Amino acid sequence: MLGATGHIGSHIVRALLAGGHAVRAAFRSDRYLHLLDGLPVERVRVDLDTGAGLAEALAGCEWVFHAAAYYPSFRDAHAPAIAKGLETTRRALEAFRRAPLSRIVFTSSAATIQRVPDRPATEEDAESWPLTHWRPLYGTVKIAIEHEVRSAAAGGLPAVIVNPSLCLGEYDAHPFSGRAILAFAKWRMPWYIDHQFNAVYTGDVGIGHVRAAERGRIGERYLLACRNVTLKEFAELVCRAAGTRPPRWRVPYRVALAAAIGTEAAAWLLHREPLVPRQAIHSARLGQLLDGSKAVRELGMPQTPIEEAIDRALAWFRRHGQLSGTIQE
């Protein structure tokens, strides 16, 4: 299990253990090892940038779950970020070829799926590579990486690709999707923009990964998705659950983009990730509705209500001291 201390990886580990599987949990940094506390797993250190520890981590494994693909920072330039994503992916795929694996489940992203104007998008609407139009850096890197994995599967590697939408739930120790929950729950973002997206409980995504290993068809993509919502609806659900004020103002795209530039400037000074990066606003302008019925049909993907996912995320953030200073209604 590569990326075992990530948000998705933590749920995959627990889904595997619930299914009675022995788990070797690969991690890069000690910082998030507490997410594995109390779990009966073997822990191994792996650095995918260099490949150190990867062969040893794969030794004797039947399946591998790769939930540690390269994630570009808002500071990264386009070409170097794509090159690094491809380099680390190719290194991992070569290690997989040398190991006696019966199934590889690769965690991609719903960002590799095209926006379709008149209906929810499916796995058949995946972007081609190389791109013929502009996409935000995160999506561009994920599309390039996914194409590399698909090519490897076409060449005989037993890989299945899963594409989670926005994941909500516990064990979000270095928040990505959780930033949106925290921003609205703490009233750090008292505004919203016109935006539609799909959200899913991360626990269901963990189960979806295990089902992809058990039942998924080699070379196929599976959208691990649940409910399509507007950003306004999502914010109201979060604020109702947190007992805080819902956002008051709908702002134009250009105002939101200016705010994102401001949060990026602050992030540069504070050496942290921005609350709202520009690429999130660029993606939000496009919007994305998804149809995850293929994963429900073929994998038995659960569909936990996102209200419960939000409750679980808030409870986890509260236990870890990240919800202090909220503004009550």
Image (spheres, rainbow, N blue to C red):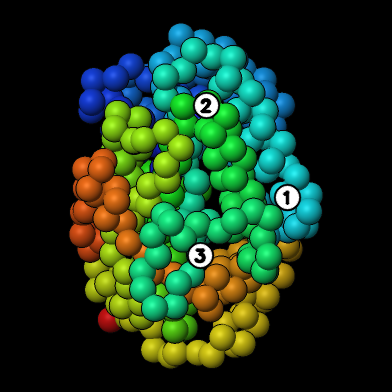
Residue located at (62% from left, 40% from top): 148
Give the Cα separation between the discs numbered 3 and 1.
Answer: 21 Å
Q: Indicate which label's residue lies in the foreground, 1 or 2.
A: 2
Q: Nearer the viewer, residue 216 or 31?
A: 216
Local crowd size for mark 1, using a 10 Å CA cut-off: few (<14), some (14–19), many (≥20):
many
- For label 1, the residue is 81
Assess whether mark 2 and mark 1 are in contact (beta carbons under 8 angstroms).
no
Assess whether mark 2 and mark 3 are in contact (beta carbons under 8 angstroms).
no
**Residue type highlighted by circle 3:** Gln
Counting residues from the start of the chain, the first of labels 1 and 2 encountered is 1
Quadrant in which residue 52 is drawn: top right
Height in image: 315 above or below 23? Answer: below
Q: Nearer the viewer, residue 205 or 128?
A: 128
- For label 2, the residue is 157
Residue located at (79% from left, 49% from top): 80
Q: Is residue 14 visible?
A: no
Local crowd size for mark 2, using a 10 Å CA cut-off: few (<14), some (14–19), many (≥20):
many
Local crowd size for mark 3, using a 10 Å CA cut-off: few (<14), some (14–19), many (≥20):
many
Residue 73 lies, in percent from the top left, at 67, 54
